[in-house]
Image (tube, helix red, strand yellow):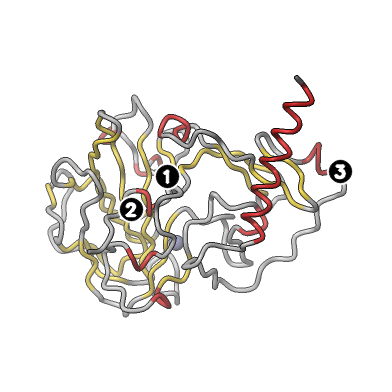
Amino acid sequence: MRALLYAALAVLVLSAAGRLAGGAPAGLRVQYRKVSSAPAPSPDLQSLCPARTLPDGRVCIPVPAFPTDLAALDSERSAHRERNGQWRNYDQIPRRPDRPTEYERYALPLQVASREQIVSGYDLDLPDALQRRGDELSAVGHGGVDIVEQRGAEVRLIALERQQADAVVLYVGPLFGNTVVTHHILREGGEQRDYLMLFGHLERPAPGLHVGQALPAGSLVGLVGDSGSAGIVHLHLEIRRVRTGVSPTALGSGEYVHNARTVACDPRNVLLLRP
Ligand SMILES: [Zn+2]
């Protein structure tokens, strides 16, 4: 029985390694400064690798969760090595295998004419070594997608897949620089789930935008800027699922991205595909 278990694990590791050999998904281009020279993991990876990962060469590879139904995704767990060298486990909802990898195939809050505008994608589902980190970035990994556009370009609200009604403005204020957070209710597996969409680094929010305001798709959210990311004019778009039992309207500004309250979600799971 044990031998059978080990054989099954070996198959999982080999299939994960096979996917790794393919490199980062197309459309994910990490362009943020040089990669920091973190010390190479010691050979004793078995004890260093976090839960639900297994050593493979010099890296820890997440063991794929099967089946990848919504219930399984709910508890999907990943890990990366923080800048202080410690491993951190976190929950996240990875891209479903049936969703295209290229961001430009989705309806986005900006007109994307070229994939060159997508400078950094969601990478929290990738092995530690492939997650974004740089000398000027405080956080390891990237829970959203960064889209470059000219300063002042209009950011317009989009509806998400299976969205039930107009989104509602939940927050306008500092978070990722000047940030707007909207609340979207999606129907998933017969129940309604709360999602947040975060628009970061805005030059400024749309005039008159206020908390509690219902906002139809196409409404102006704000203008592209570099607040909180001086010199890099871009939109940081992040989508998070609110945990069951948590009321979105009761969240404080620091809790929108707090792992105990909301879970990072690969935006490609819920963005609408372009016709
Ligand atoms: Zn970003």
Which quadrant is home to the C terminus? bottom left
| Residue to which mark 2 is pinned | 198
Residue at image x 58%, y 53%? Answer: 126
Residue 23's spot in the image, x, y percent?
61, 63
Residue at image x 61%, y 39%? Answer: 89
Residue type at numbered disc 3: Asp
Q: Is mark 2 within 8 Å of ligand 1?
A: no
Q: Quadrant of residue 248?
A: top left
| Residue to which mark 1 is pinned | 257
Callout 2 secondary element: strand
Residue type at numbered disc 2: Leu
Residue type at numbered disc 1: Val
Q: Do callouts 2 and 1 mark residues in contact (Cβ within 8 Å)? A: yes
Using the numbered discs, state the Cα–Cα distance from disc 2 to disc 1 in whole angstroms. 9 Å
| Residue to which mark 3 is pinned | 44
Return the residue nearer the eye: 209 or 14: 14
Residue 258's spot in the image, x, y percent?
45, 40
